[in-house]
Image (spheres, rainbow, N blue to C red):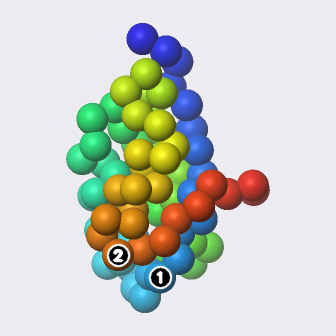
Amino acid sequence: MAESKIVRLMTTGMHCGSCAMLIDMTLGDLEGVSEVKTDYASGISSVTFDPDVRSADDLIAAVRSVGYEATLSEA
């Protein structure tokens, strides 16, 4: 098992705190994801995951699957 990795995703299309909660639940339900925190105000989702199980592309695809856009954040 690889060491956990943390990525920050810039998420767009959120309109309220419930949007952030939906993103958190969607990402949190993925196998290999151990922690998610989406901040509605900044649009940043911080995701801790096992890179042996998931990739950053998997995380982005999951966010997109519920109607939001996500890209890797440089910050």
Which numbered disc covers residue 67? Answer: 2
Which residue is found at the position 42% from the left and 74% from the top? 68
Please determine whether, in this image, residue 62 is positioned above or below residue 58. Answer: below
Identify the image quadrant of the N terminus: top left
Q: In what element is the residue under mark 1?
A: loop
Residue occupying the far right of the picture? 75
Which residue is found at the position 39% from the left and 66% from the top? 64
Give coordinates of residue 37: x percent, y percent. 46, 55
Q: In what element is the residue under mark 2?
A: loop
Residue 51 can be seen, yes or no: yes
Please determine whether, in this image, residue 44 is positioned above or below residue 8. Answer: below
Measure the alpha-carbon separation of dots 1 and 2.
8 Å
**24 with respect to 51 (left or right):** left
Which residue is found at the position 47% from the left and 82% from the top? 13
The residue to which callout 1 is attached is 13
Give coordinates of residue 45: x percent, y percent. 52, 59
Q: Judge by depth and name the residue closer to the eye, 39 or 6.
A: 6
Q: Judge by depth and name the residue closer to the eye, 67 or 37.
A: 67
Residues at discs 1 and 2 in contact (Cβ within 8 Å)? yes
Q: Quarter of the image holding residue 63?
A: bottom left
Residue occupying the far top of the picture? 1
Which residue is found at the position 36% from the left and 38% from the top? 33
Residue occupying the far bottom of the picture? 15
**38 with respect to 27 (left or right):** right
Q: Indicate the amino acid at tag 1.
A: Gly
Identify the image quadrant of the C terminus: bottom right
Give coordinates of residue 65: x percent, y percent. 31, 65
Residue 36 can be seen, yes or no: no
Few, some or many residues within 10 Å of mark 1 (<14, 14–19, 20+): few
Give coordinates of residue 20: x percent, y percent. 39, 71
Few, some or many residues within 10 Å of mark 2 (<14, 14–19, 20+): few
**5 with respect to 66 (left or right):** right
